[in-house]
Image (cartoon, rainbow, N blue to C red):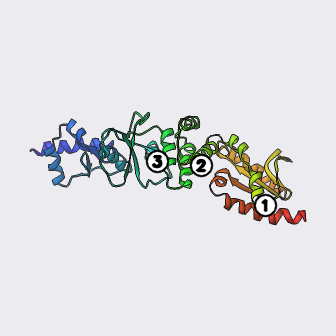
Amino acid sequence: MSRTRSTERQRLAAELAADHDGVVHRADLRGLGVSRHEVRVEVEAERWVCVGRNTVRILAVGTGLRAPLWTAVWESGCGAVLDGAAALVAQGMKGFDLATIDVALPKSARVHPLSGVTPHLRRDLGPVMGSGLPRTRPENALIRAAQWARSDRQAALLVCLPVQQRLVRPADVLAAWAAVQRSPRRVLIGSVLRDVCDGAHSLGELDFAGWCRAYGLPPPRRQSVRVSPTGRVYLDVEWDGLVVEIDGGHHLAGLNPMDDALRANEVVLDGTPVLRLPVLGLRLQPEAFMAQVRRAVERYVLPSAA
């Protein structure tokens, strides 16, 4: 074996690995003319490392964050694709650390167990993305990620992040959810999806007055109107001496945060305290947020009513 041949082999492998965050598939190496014997030579020379049956790490190329995702797909079994949160991360989702890599495989596939990977055998994988890491479409991955989440709070996060980061269209998510017949978190996921994807409609469904009754609070006024220097100000919830603003998912879109701040600031400058309650907070931690409302009512509303 000539030094020239070895140098050329390393160059080709490095170019291939650069497209896969530092790892390559043995089949792709064979496609470049690299034999099993030559792979073994590079491994023994400590220039390459065998990660599994199919995956080889090329040490001359830095290992990227997606290398474990490529490895999970290549090592889990025939037809494997990323699913759930792993598919969303591959799509570009930020702000979430994977505790496991979810992989979907055809029901007939032979699964090869891999540390840190959770396989899911599916009768129908559904549509998959046609380029880059093999993965389910983001609207389906979002729903499965929420179903497989370790907690309701994490499920809500995995709904919010892809929508807020514009990795998926809200209409596509709602359409995918409509096709789901069974879900271990149907009520929660359905509520959070409406909050995030159709916030204005979701706020209309929110029974805040019912919560006030449940917590022994006097009934508030809904959608009251004030006149400020900037025009009419519509308030979500008001008592004499206290305003509560309920922020749905649509409050985060476009210039809405600026408009909300101007409206709330005018109310505060007029001498009325304002509590802001995210609608997701009311879904996930109603006791904590309603306890704050109770304290505010006791401090600002009840004394003036006495």
Label 1 amino acid?
Gly
Q: Nearer the viewer, residue 145 or 59?
A: 145
Q: Quadrant of residue 217?
A: bottom right
Where is residue 56 drawn, in percent x and y?
25, 48
In the picture provided, is 102 more to the left or to the right than 43?
A: right
The residue tagged 3 is 85
Label 2 amino acid?
Leu
Q: Quadrant of residue 286?
A: bottom right
Circle 3 residues within 10 Å: few <14, some 14–19, many ≥20: many
Label 3 amino acid?
Ala
Q: Nearer the viewer, residue 74 or 215?
A: 215
Q: Is residue 100 above or below residue 29?
A: below
The C terminus lies in which quarter of the figure?
bottom right
Residue at position x 52%, y 42% in the image: 182
Q: CA distance from mark 2 to mark 3?
A: 18 Å
Where is residue 207 drawn, in percent x and y?
73, 49
Q: Secondary structure at mark 3?
A: helix
State how many labels appear: 3
Residue at position x 51%, y 39% in the image: 139
- Whichever of labels 2 and 3 marks the residue nearer the N terminus, that label is 3
Given this view, does label 2 or label 3 mark the residue nearer the observer? 2
- Whichever of labels 3 and 1 marks the residue nearer the N terminus, that label is 3
The residue tagged 2 is 188
The residue tagged 1 is 216
Where is residue 184 drawn, in percent x and y?
53, 48
